[in-house]
Image (cartoon, coloured by chain):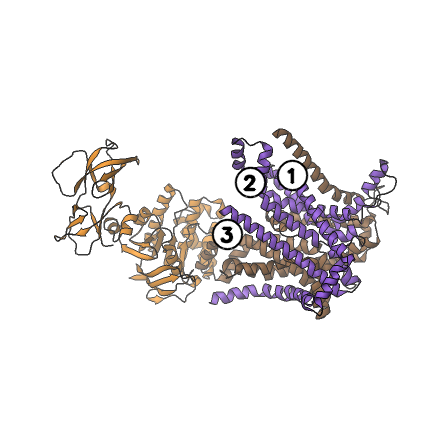
Chain colours: A purple, B brown, C orange
Amino acid sequence: MKDRRISVALLLPSLVGIILFLIFPVVQLVLPVIFGVKSNETYFSFLKATYNQQIIFRTIGIAFVTTLGLLVLAFPFAFWIAHQRMKVRKLLSLVILFPMLTNAVVRNFAWILILGRNGLVNTLLMDLHIVHQPVRILYTNTAIVIGLIYLFFPVMVTMLIDPIVSLDQSIDEAAAMSGAGPLTRFFKITLPQLTTSLLTGSILVFAGAMTAYTTPQLLGGNSSLVLSTLLYQQSMTLGDWRAASIVALTLILIALASLSITKVITKRISGGNEV
Amino acid sequence: MRQKKHWLLTLYGYLMLLLLLLPLVLVVVTSFGSQAAITFPIKGFTLKWYANILSQPDFVTGFKTSFAVAVTASFLAIVVGTPAVYALTRCGIHHANWFQTVFLSPTLIPEIVIGFALFQSLVIGIKLPLMPVLITGHFLLSVPYVIRMLTARLLLFDQTIEEASWLSGASKIKTFFRVVIPNISGTLLAIFIMCFINSFNNIPITLFLNGPSLTMLPTAILNYLQNNYDPTVSAVSVILMLLTGLMMWLMERMNGLTHVNEHLNQKGQN
Amino acid sequence: MQAMQVKHLSMSYENGKEVLTDINFSVNAGELVSILGPSGCGKTTTLRIIAGLQRQTSGNVAIDEQSIDSVPAFKRNMSMVFQNYALFPHLSVFENVAFGLKQRGIGKTAIRKRVAEILSLTELTDLANHRPHALSGGQQQRVSLARALVVNPTLLLLDEPLSNLDRALRLSLREEIRRLQQKLGITALFVTHDQEESFAISDRVIVMNGGHIEQIASAQIVYAHPATTFVAKFIGFENFFNVTRQETSNEYLSGETHLYMAEKTTKPVVRLCIRPENIRLDTSMDTDTQQNSLNGIICDKTYLGRTYRYVVATDHLGQIKVDSEEATHQLGDAVRLTLPSDKLIALAE
């Protein structure tokens, strides 16, 4: 029983730290929204406002397109890396890790340079006489999507490399021996084995895109507000803490929902494999 | 058929690699352009934007503060988190999963919400000064890294080695410091660096917890970008990339990078 | 003199699963006792409780008649050789061996002298500055042994120390352990699942099964006179016959077959058993009813290297396994089996 007391003593500092400084503040933030005076009314009136609805739909839309784009772009890339020799694969992993560990401001600034009014894309388009006036790309939803894809591309790729590498080659060979062509094998054998990774990766990226702040702030600005930038604007610029709390609650719900969906998926699929 | 598919895939691989690195290369290139407005192609060659960084007090003090906060928060997280991980992996705790979830909860709640919540209840609510709250926020960010990376390491560390030490006459505490710590020191350093990078780069939490008296580098750059569009930002970015490179090199030397990828996956990045 | 006693040791997990039931035994000073049993029989748990690495539910462990249950592992002055060596990866061979002495607050020069002694005894002197990962498995286990011996432990515990090594190494290291243990007069408890290993190395053998002790005796006695059906099966008896005793007390009846034992016994007997290599196999179809003889037909034949394993189907005693160097018998042959009365063992349970 002495051992138990020691282990409690070892756990206590971090436990208290997290409960006191994370869980308690967050609960304090969302409770008034859920149980406060006329809380339902304010919450629904917030949702009913066309302006807010627009932002919610924009946020969901951007996250959705980002996730789809990442699936299409990252999967073949991960496939390519996974089929390299061990040494090359390690080197490429480092190359991917570099942007991942680089400050998000830097990464988004790079896209301002590319997409801006006098940016690389506009300069090229005008030099080639495709357009005569700079096209507005920066501060649009498209810019946010591009920025988010760039932001999450390395994340998605690293999530996929290991599962692809650990695919059992002999299963594919067995399918080939049974007469399945390359395309059939890819869609009927390889892809189904990667469903879990693709799904969990997508959900993670979707949740990340829904809650990201820096990218929509820098590439979307005030003309393309999303929930996270709205949260900051409401609280720090406009001082409407009630609205900010509502946005915060919405963001928490999104995060928790994606977490539970991921858990259900991994449980169901790994459970299915065992049977 | 197989050959052709392979060829296409290779082309695609190199193309994506290029797209991944090109934006960062562009930042480096623009930092040397002599014109105040960034245009393509750049004209001239100068290092004055690097000099200009030093004349921006926000960048200089921001760097110092960010550095200090990151070091403090990472250190705290390791000091507080390591005993917890030890208890979770060694003491046969009931409901270990439950504790694990609590320790990882900072990754479950969007960072921007954490920032807002800390600001509201600690800064406005109980009137704590900004600095300790900022460090608390960054500490919260770091705890999950400690928990994940150290749990993985300790699960790999053969417990019979500790038992051999106990039987050799070293108490549990002595064993922890003379046998366990020397063997996981590389991982601890890698964890420290990961926490440091993550804290140093953080924006969503920092955003709520800085102020006129407390400047942090990433938010200082963010503010600068709102009003200016000159190569100074490129120059700062290059410095930050060099810092990232240095950290990666350090971690690679600790042999810790192989683990890092897996742990980064768990977390969305802002 | 009894160096260590284990009295009424029981251990169960919180979910109620009992892993040890009333374990009693002792180890005499200078003796090497081995605990033999299949995996999951509780032998390692017993060892870990003695070492203080695990806590028993009831009963106690005593050294020189003094209970040590409240003494933590690091103060018990025991040492242990682990199956996976458990060397300190960050320390050299020398430092590994010196570790225990350092904890005991021994001076530097004394440590150097003592470690050098042990390293030369275990033929590790040349490797003193190597790190464990640079050593082979056999070398690592020798370092582990040196580390365990250097502190002059009251009790040396060995937990399957040879299981991770290949056969040749296992044999030579086994002899080395025995040699050092006897030379240094160390009291030792050796856990293994390997019958040959346990017989070769120990003064006495404790056979465990399902959390309790089946038999404690010298290797010779365990080999010749297993106390229980489990022990008999574990050490190579393969033919078992349920019997009832006839009045003459050395005549037994299994179904309709009469079996005679050479020696008389007074204990209750439920089963007789015999090793496959002790049964005689003949082609001659003698019809005269010799004692303990019966007819059968060969239904399986396997080449085992030194011998052939025949499975013989008999009318009344079922299938009997026989090992014979004779290669001439073929499947379907009618043969005559003789079960020598002095090779039959009576089992009470």
Eye-nearest disc, 3 or 2:
2
Q: Which residue is mark 2?
A: A167
Disc 2 residue crowd, few under 14, some 14–19, many 20+, Cα 10 Å? some
Foreground: A72 or B264?
A72
Q: Can you say whether B81 is above or below A107 in the image?
A: below
The secondary element bearing badge 3 is classed as loop
Give the amino acid at mark 1.
Answer: Pro
**Residue C164 % position (x, y):** 41, 46
Left or right side of C85 for A191: right
Q: Chain of mark 2?
A: A
Q: Chain of mark 3?
A: C
Q: Which residue is mark 1?
A: A76
**Residue C266 % position (x, y):** 16, 56
**Disc assigned to residue C91:** 3
Q: Chain of mark 1?
A: A
Q: Quadrant of residue B41?
A: top right
The secondary element bearing badge 2 is classed as loop
